[in-house]
């Protein structure tokens, strides 16, 4: 029970610590990505603040979930019309606020974790947030999948239900497969059109290099033209074979 | 044997296309557009293949 909660907390602390160092407060946010989840109708936005803050907002008709990462601190808040829960943590403290109570777990008071867990477990906002996240239809390869999955475990007070466990197992399996495959395309724009643009850029660069090479040859460099041609051929053929690979069927 | 010859002809025409294509992209800026460029590339490869097929291997008379 505690182990799941601690694992989730550790994962989030790690993410928070690796996040950009910045100061919170009075931060203007710029929306980087916005989408509507097909399964729940919830609007999901990813925003970045001037100070380096990264925020994920999930807005459903009667629920608002927000996850903020700033200056090594992660804040997760869930709001429903009748309840509100905030979970914060940084290098030293894990704080849960909800139901009129506030519990701060520190290295000096690790025993408070049970009290913090009970606040989460008794929060209707947390339960509804976890249910909403569970119904969302992000694919296992969506970058924010792991973030929302860990949030779901956290909102279930370290006692993930069977669906959460199954989703986590699926994500781990998918991640392992991707690692095994060795190649993961990270850009959604990396399609055949981009293959052509990259090929054309490389081919033009190869030809320009060949022209420069030929123009800068001295009369005594008798093998120079051949050398320029060999380099050009290698580059041109390399670019062409890369393009063939780029547009070919592969998974 | 015929199949091997066709494969070799295809490889040679691909190499010719790969070598000529950069020069075409520089001299014909319109070819940088994907649709034009791909058409040009396909045409170049077809012409190369046809010429290579005509001259190699030599037919016995």
Image (cartoon, coloured by chain):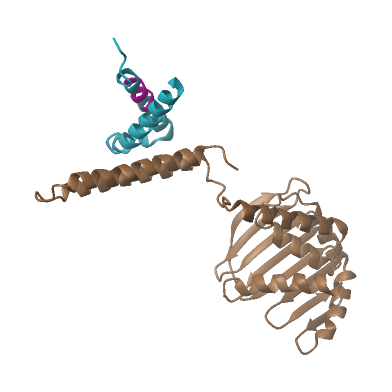
Q: Is residue B8 above or below residue A90?
A: above
In the picture, which quadrant includes the C terminus of chain A?
top right
**Which quarter of the picture shows residue A132?**
bottom right
- Chain that is brown in the image: A
Instruction: Please report the bounds of the magenta region as a residue range.
Output: B45-51
The answer to which of A45 and B2 lies nearer the viewer is B2
Number of numbered callouts drawn: 0
On the picture, is A136 further left or further right than A237?
A: right
On the picture, is A196 further left or further right than A141?
A: left
Magenta span: chief secondary structure: helix
**Residue B32 on image: x %, y %:** 37, 37
Q: Is residue A115 above or below residue A218?
A: below
Q: Residue at the spot x=67%, y=50% of the render?
A: A35
- Residue lying farthest left? A219
The answer to which of A87 and A28 lies nearer the viewer is A87
Q: Residue at the spot x=67%, y=52% of the render?
A: A177
Q: Is residue A154 above or below residue B45?
A: below
Q: Residue at the spot x=70%, y=70% of the render?
A: A12
The answer to which of A226 and A239 lies nearer the viewer is A226
The answer to whether one can see residue A99 in this image is no
- Chain that is cyan in the image: B
In the picture, which quadrant includes the N terminus of chain A?
bottom right
**Which quarter of the picture shows residue A22?**
bottom right
**Residue A172 on image: x %, y %:** 72, 58
The answer to whether one can see residue A154 in this image is yes
**Residue B34 on image: x %, y %:** 43, 35
The answer to which of A71 and A159 lies nearer the viewer is A159
**Any magenta on residue A16?**
no
- Residue lying farthest bottom? A108
**Residue A185 on image: x %, y %:** 56, 50
């Amino acid at each position: 029970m505690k182990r799941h909660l601690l694992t989730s907390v550790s994962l989030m602390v790690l993410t928070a610590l690796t996040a950009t160092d910045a100061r919170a407060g009075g931060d203007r946010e710029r929306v980087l990505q916005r989408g509507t989840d097909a399964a729940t109708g919830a609007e999901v936005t990813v925003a970045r603040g001037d100070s380096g803050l990264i925020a994920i907002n999930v807005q459903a008709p009667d629920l608002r979930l927000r996850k903020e990462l700033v200056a090594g601190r992660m804040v997760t808040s869930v709001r429903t019309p009748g309840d509100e829960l905030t979970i914060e943590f940084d290098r030293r403290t894990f704080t849960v606020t909800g139901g009129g109570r506030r519990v701060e777990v520190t290295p000096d008071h690790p025993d408070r974790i049970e009290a913090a867990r009970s606040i989460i477990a008794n929060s209707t906002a947390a339960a509804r947030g976890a249910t909403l996240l569970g119904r969302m239809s992000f694919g296992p390869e969506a970058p924010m999948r792991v973030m929302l999955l860990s949030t779901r475990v956290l909102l279930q007070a370290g006692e993930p239900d069977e669906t959460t466990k199954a989703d986590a197992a699926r994500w781990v399996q998918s991640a392992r497969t991707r690692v095994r495959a060795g190649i993961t395309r990270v850009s959604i724009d990396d399609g055949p059109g981009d293959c052509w643009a990259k090929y054309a850029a490389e081919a033009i660069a190869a030809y320009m290099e060949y022209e420069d090479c030929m123009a800068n040859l001295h009369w005594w460099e008798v093998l120079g033209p051949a050398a320029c041609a060999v380099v050009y051929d290698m580059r041109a053929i390399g670019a062409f074979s890369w393009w063939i690979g780029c547009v070919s069927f592969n998974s | 044997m015929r199949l091997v010859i066709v494969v070799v002809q295809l490889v040679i025409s691909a190499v010719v296309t790969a070598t000529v294509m950069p020069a075409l992209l520089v001299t014909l800026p319109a070819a940088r557009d994907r649709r034009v460029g791909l058409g040009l590339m396909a045409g170049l490869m077809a012409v190369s293949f046809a010429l290579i097929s005509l001259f190699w291997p030599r037919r016995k008379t």
